[in-house]
Amino acid sequence: MSEASRKIRVAISIGDYNGIGIEVILKTLHEKEITELFTPVIFGSTKLLSYQKDRLKFDKINFQGIQDPSQIVDGKINVVNLWKDQIDVQFGKVTKEAGTHAFESLKAATESVGNGFTDVLVTAPINKDNIQSDEFNFPGHTEYLAETWKGRALMFLVSEKLKVGLVSQHVPIKDVAKQITNKSVYYKIQQIHKSLIEDYAIEKPKIAVLGLNPHAGDNGLLGAEEKEIIIPVIKSCIEKNQLIFGPYPADSFFTPKNLDAFDAVLAMYHDQGLVAFKTISFDEGVNYTAGLKYVRTSPDHGVAYDIAGKGIANEESFKEAIYTAIELYKNRAEYKELTKNVLQHIPLKLEKGDNKE
């Protein structure tokens, strides 16, 4: 089978196995004929996956155990066996072992995309505490992938109703204002603008920018960041003929009218954007790491220890993460195809006697 004709291969990292990650993976792959749409490649172990499959009574799922991504079989649910030992799963518990295995899964899945064995990466939720080690010293997936894939990542929360990007990502509130600079705000706007064109085929994106302070600074009364940083950046984007608007007060922005008017929103910090996003798009929301040369998505929820092992986790967000990754991969490929041989304008040399006007 040629590279062009084979199904898209989706690398899946298992996250913290004491949470709901493997459950939502299996519920997604349990759907009939799912492998006709793409080839799943899970990085973990067949023993671990089989243990949770049996608990869920998913008898129709069959795994293709392999030792290396070079052995992927298209049309099968591949499991790359990273370890042979039986795993002691303790649902709802925070264990160092689960964090260690979560990183091993993430690292191997990430490398498989970079090495061309798989096409996109979809990550199940991790515990940002127990995954920490000498190799993983990052606030989350976004920062790790930016370092590993050598790029500047944009945390972009996306759904059919709403798309939200962030200027500052996983930082304490006390440090947010330090990260709001002319350079950072401008760069994030450009990342969103580029992603909307290349990943979503929106020819002329309209982007709303939120203020940092209450009431968007209230003309400097409640903070100077809007007047000194955000407004000048918006003006510079408008001068580039980009449709950038704001800054808008965050507390009153997320109305149906505004959501219909804009293609995406830039929030200044994590909770400013994500509280609204998860309220509006929780079951269908996807966390997309834009701005990198490879596509990575994840569900917009965490490990959910409180319901782990109970069989009641909702898989819709994880399922959307897979479908979104596939769609983005195809859109990027189409954009590259459409733009790689664009004809350059070549002035015609007029013959003597031709009308020069």
Image (cartoon, rainbow, N blue to C red):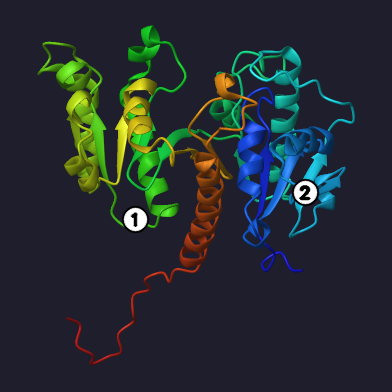
Quadrant location of the C terminus? bottom left
335 above or below 25? below
Classify mark 2: helix, strand or loop: strand
Q: Amino acid at mark 1?
A: Ile
- Horizontal and vertical percent for residue 251? 20, 24
- Which residue occupies 33% across, 21% down? 181
Total numbered badges shown on the rendered structure: 2
- In which quadrant of the rendered view does residue 236 lie? top left
- Which residue occupies 38% across, 31% down? 278
Looking at this view, name the residue that lies furthest to the top.
Answer: 174
Looking at this view, name the residue that lies furthest to the front.
Answer: 57
Residue 87 shows in the view = yes
Looking at this view, name the residue that lies furthest to the right.
Answer: 84
Residue bearing the label numbered 1: 202
Residue bearing the label numbered 2: 78
14 above or below 58? above
188 above or below 262? above
- Horizontal and vertical percent for residue 259? 24, 42
> Circle 1: is it few (<14), some (14-19), or many (20+) Cα within 10 Å?
some
Classify mark 1: helix, strand or loop: loop
- In which quadrant of the rendered view does residue 175 lie? top left
